[in-house]
Amino acid sequence: MENYQAEELVKYIKKFAEKRIMVLGDLIADKFIIADPERLSREAPVLILKHQQEKTLPGGGANAAANIASLGAEVDLLGVVGDDLAAEALKEELNQRQIITAGIFKDASRPTAEKTRILAGGDQIVRQQVVRVDKVKSFDISSSLREKLLSYLKENIAQSDAVLFSDYGNGIFNQNTTTDFVQTAAAADKNSAVDSRYQLGQFKGAVIATPNLEEASAIYGEELRSQAEVEKAGLKMRKDLELQYLLITQGGDGMSLFAPGDKIDHIPAANFTEVFDVTGAGDTVVGTLILALAAGAPVEIAIRIANYAAGIVVRKSGVASVTAAELIREVNKNDS
């Protein structure tokens, strides 16, 4: 593992505000209901909670977009939502973050993907998630929506510096769409990053993909339990998927980058001992990574910047994001 000085990383972070990233992905409305525990119900052995507040935050591909926007870049977000209140709440939140939403199209045949988390706890203790309820319809988008997304991508990609594909398996990416999306980015000579939960094999030819250990194990066909197994699988997967780079994120064990020439670069996790909540950490990694690449950082430096961003976000509660100022402080702190 090669070490880099903080100033080498910071000079690229300072360029984030000059960049524009397109994010195409499955959009999710992350709804949080915050309540205080009151008593046990007489009807059943369940906790009765007193509602305090609720909020809707960007989830899925929208969370990746929110992470990039938080770091100072302009974001053009593409995706599909339903014709419902969840879509309105999500769009309002995106607009507040100054994320471009012209590429978000409505599909009245499916509800907006929504994940509702109920958090309970008093003022003096950390609120904990009690239950999560998902409302998701996962089926392929229609041919008309495919054409709308592809047309928007082709018409606007020249104005962006890179593209992020965020696949949560909700229907935007399928055998009829994915290849066209990836080839459009390649034809425009744009860096493309892929975060795909279930179907990474469809994204052949992308610049970089960022599966976690569980996802990489599923693609490889067997559980990866040691660093030697990760390295063996990563070398094969990068070639089979025709990727320029493959980054396998390994939680507390860090990240492993696989590059041309069978080069392997492993970095330990940043601040793993201070982990509080890993929700959305994968979105932070891939969002920061593609932004760093767009800023001109070599991939070896880009993954270190992303690693620091992940180290910050896991110390925050819920679906959180990182600012460029926070990231610069973190890099400088760890270099001191």
Image: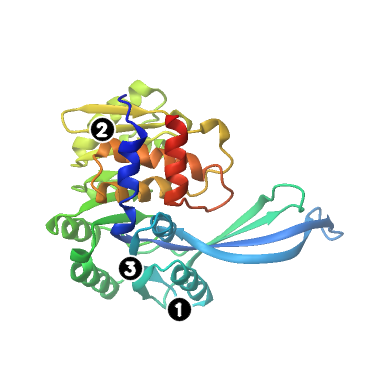
* Residue in the picture at 36% in, 62% down: 171
| Snapshot colouring | rainbow
Q: Residue furthest right?
A: 42
Q: Residue at the spot x=21%, y=72% of the render?
A: 151
- Tag 1, which secondary structure? loop
**What residue would you read off at disc 1?**
83
Mark 2 vs 1: CB contact within 8 A: no
| Amino acid type, residue under disc 3 in the picture | Ile
**Closer to viewer: mark 2 or mark 1:** 2
The residue that mark 3 highlights is 141
Quadrant for the C terminus in the image: top left
Q: Which of the 4 quarters of the picture holds residue 40? A: bottom right
Q: Residue at x 33, y 39 (%)?
A: 9
Residue that carries the numbered disc 2 in the rendered image: 258
* Residue drawn at the location 20% of the way across and 38% of the way down: 240
Report the number of discs.
3
The residue type indicated by label 2 comes to Phe
Q: Is the residue marked by circle 1 packed among few (<14), some (14-19), or many (20+) residues within 10 Å?
A: some
Question: Of marks 2 and 3, which one's residue comes earlier in the chain?
Answer: 3
Between disc 1 and disc 3, the foreground one is 1
The image quadrant where one finds the N terminus is top left
Q: Earlier in the sequence, mark 2 or mark 1?
A: 1
The Cα–Cα distance between marks 2 and 1, rounded to whole angstroms, is 42 Å
Q: In front of the other: label 2 or label 3?
A: 2
